[in-house]
Image (spheres, rainbow, N blue to C red):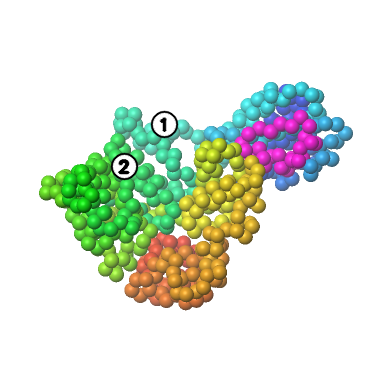
Amino acid sequence: MITSASLEIKLANVMNTLPALLPMRRGAIVALNADGALETAATFGFEHASSGARYLPAKAAIDRIVAKGAPLAFPDACKSDLFQDELQSLMSGTGQVTFIGVPMKVDQETLGTLWIDRANDGGTLEQEVRFLSLVANLVAQAIRLDRHQSRDDQPIMDEEGARKKNSGDKEPPEPARQRPAKIDWIVGESPALKEVVEIVEVVARTNSAVLLRGESGTGKEFFARAIHELSSRRKKPFVKLNCAALSGSVLESELFGHEKGAFTGAISQRAGRFELADGGTLLLDEIGEISPAFQAKLLRVLQEGELERVGGTKTLKVDVRLICATNKNLETAVADGEFRADLYYRINVVPIFLPPLRERKGDIPRLARVFLDQFNKENNRDLAFTPAALDLLSKCYFPGNVRELENCVRRTATLARSGTIVPSDFSCQNGQCASSMLWTGADRPHDGHTFNGLAMSRSLSVESPISFGYPSGPGSVTVTQNVTDRELLISAMEKAGWVQAKAARILGLTPRQVGYALRRHGIKVKKI
């Protein structure tokens, strides 16, 4: 069901009142349910239709309205390709039939469609479209309010009221503390994402060092910026540096700066990233890639808050909040002597594990719409997804996470043949998705090479690729050809005596990820 009993009555009253205000033959309110599917919530003029029916008259037109988020009006619907499947129903002895459909929207979010049809009287439709749009938006607000009340079992409270209730009016008013703006660059409502955002909001109030961990493409930089913007340092600079592929000497110059003449090409004095971030926040991405020699230099700065520019003798004091990010297993690196243990403990004060996209599938449609909107603005296009297309995206695995989803959306939008993106537009539906071949290891010889630290086999599928990485530490599990991720997990658990924390270290994962994998594969933990 998409509505409560009380809302169902209200929507039925709306449809029964419309004929007194507009000339109409039939009409319906069609809303998106919790699964993103369209269902009829209320109707008028249908002998056999009922609320919640799966049968959707004018389905093609409704899909178009929901996808575009814009009204559709046809003076003679029989001439449109959108109604070819139900010409007989449209005609019904009335001659030409006019169709008007408008989206039901709240805060730019489309919740469904309100549509009517009637005999064509040759008049203009602009006034009727405006009136229906007004009614549709009121219906959308009623649906939104009903869903919130059903979920929380209490009336909606505005943000200011909620803040006062939670604080007990003990804290100073928020304007006096210049509360930061909404973090609108983090998109999603999934429980996994909300959990991370809650941690970020708490951590941001302190100056503790943060280590962002997670797979490539999970948005570490966006969360680092969120920590900065929610902190008391938000008026100071947010500086970032990717440490990967930089030699020790270049990295030293980038972070600490250099004096004029310190080396060939140093034609002037230059401030380093630590100086530039003084009073603010410094993000060091790919921290696991720095050399052991430079790790010792970085450790001194973090411990003492002091540095010297390359080629200089003056000691500079800096006050920087450090955020590091990595997709590397630092525990294994420490065990192998590749990463200093003292530096590890210095940067790993507050670890935050970012969930992969497969753990927040409900956010995929929202993210896809955001990426498509960006594409439309950049290319002066007006593309939109159909519900079926978004449903297809939600079922994809996306091992490359948000970055891979963005590439998929842009690739599909670039090659789309019409203004509406449908499932057949995706390359995976035409056997042309190179990404799926990359992640499944299709058509690749098993020659011992590894990807993300783990050999991949021909037997893996896109729906269930191996998600474990870094089995290169001491006591790691030996991977053989055609091994599955379930077998690998069981092997690691047996080797660890069925202790999840030990198995996590063997596999290069977190205990939480191991627990999730055990539940996903239905493996019962043995007690020894």
At label 1, the amino acid type is Glu
Q: Is residue 164 visible?
A: yes
The reply, left or right, for residue 314 in relation to residue 272 is left
Residue shown at the point (41%, 31%) measured from the top left: 160
Residue that appears at 62% across and 47% down: 416
Picture residue at 58% right of the left edge, 52% below the top: 393
**Residue 496 lies in magenta, yes or no?**
no
**Marks 1 and 2: which is nearer the front?**
2
Q: Is residue 55 above or below residue 179?
A: below
Closer to the camera, 232 or 437?
Answer: 437
Say which residue label 1 marks: 160
- 11 relative to 224, above or below: above
Choose the circle earlier in sequence order: 1 or 2: 1
x%, y% of residue 427?
60, 55
Q: Position of residue 98 (x, y in %)?
A: 77, 30
Quadrant occupied by the C terminus: bottom left
Looking at the rendering, in which quadrant would you find the N terminus?
top right
Q: Which residue matches tag 2?
A: 238
In-image side of 96 versus 332 (left or right)? right
Q: Amino acid at mark 2?
A: Phe
Instruction: Look at the image and tell me whether residue 346 can be seen.
Output: no
Residues shaded magenta: 56-83
Q: Quadrant of residue 430?
A: bottom right
